[in-house]
């Protein structure tokens, strides 16, 4: 499989975890979407230099998948489970810096609308534990 296809899947799965965080309280607020799009532009586009077949930075797959999941009203649990499965099968992609950026982005999304609630805090804690388990 080409690096390009691996990167597209990588960013698609990151989109899933960000959606899972936003949807963890059963609602996705427009402020959460705005924060996601801002962080993708400011931070995620700089992660690597790969592009899809249309010449678009593959990091935009984060937004594309997030928007698609939102339009399908996907569940937080399903998206989180998909991300964790991908994470375990492709842990070599998840450097310390990438995990840190995922946690920072997730935290920003969770705090975007009226602060972090219990559901969001619990999902952030689960994600942090997951990242720390493979690091041991």
Image: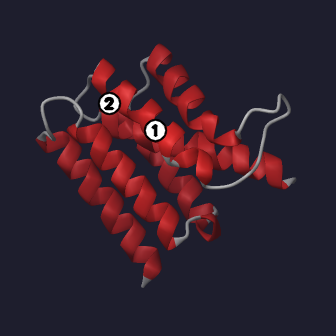
Residue 73 position within the rendered picture, expressed as x and y whole percent measured from the top left: 42, 18
Residue 112 position within the rendered picture, expressed as x and y whole percent measured from the top left: 24, 34
Q: Is residue 78 visible?
A: no
Count of residue discs:
2
Query: Can you name the residue that lies furthest to the top here?
Result: 71
| Horizontal arrangement in the rendering, residue 9 relative to residue 64 (left or right) | right
Residue 132 in the image: above or below residue 115? below
At a point 12% along the width and 30% down the height, the residue shown is 114
Secondary structure, mark 2, is helix
Q: Nearer the viewer, residue 129 or 66?
A: 66
Do residues under tags 1 and 2 come within 8 Å of each other at their CB atoms?
yes
Query: Which residue position is annotated with label 1?
Result: 79
Secondary structure, mark 1, is helix
Residue 124 position within the rendered picture, expressed as x and y whole percent measured from the top left: 27, 53
Residue 49, disc: none
At a point 35% along the width and 58% down the height, the residue shown is 127
Residue 26 in the image: above or below residue 87? above
Name which of mark 1 and mark 2 comes first in the sequence. Answer: 2
- Mark 2 nearby-residue class (10 Å; few <14, some 14–19, many ≥20): many
Placement of the C terminus among the 4 image quadrants: bottom left
Residue 39 position within the rendered picture, expressed as x and y whole percent measured from the top left: 44, 40
Q: Is residue 23 visible?
A: yes
Query: Which residue position is annotated with label 2?
Result: 23
Q: Nearer the viewer, residue 135 or 113?
A: 113
Q: Nearer the viewer, residue 60 or 133?
A: 60
At a point 64% along the width and 63% down the height, the residue shown is 90
Placement of the N terminus among the 4 image quadrants: bottom right
Residue 4 in the image: above or below residue 60? below
């Amino acid at each position: 499989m080409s690096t390009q296809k691996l990167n597209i899947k990588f960013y698609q799965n990151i989109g899933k975890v960000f959606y899972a965080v936003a949807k963890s309280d059963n609602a996705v607020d427009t402020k959460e979407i705005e924060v996601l799009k801002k962080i993708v532009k400011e931070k995620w586009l700089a992660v690597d230099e790969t592009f899809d077949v249309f010449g678009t930075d593959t990091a935009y797959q984060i937004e594309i998948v997030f928007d698609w999941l939102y339009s399908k009203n996907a569940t937080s649990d399903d998206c989180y489970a998909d991300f964790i499965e991908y994470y375990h099968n492709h842990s070599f992609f998840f450097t310390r810096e990438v995990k840190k950026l995922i946690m920072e982005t997730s935290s920003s999304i969770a705090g975007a609308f009226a602060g972090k609630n219990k559901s969001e805090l619990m999902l952030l804690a689960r994600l942090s534990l997951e990242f720390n388990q493979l690091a041991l």
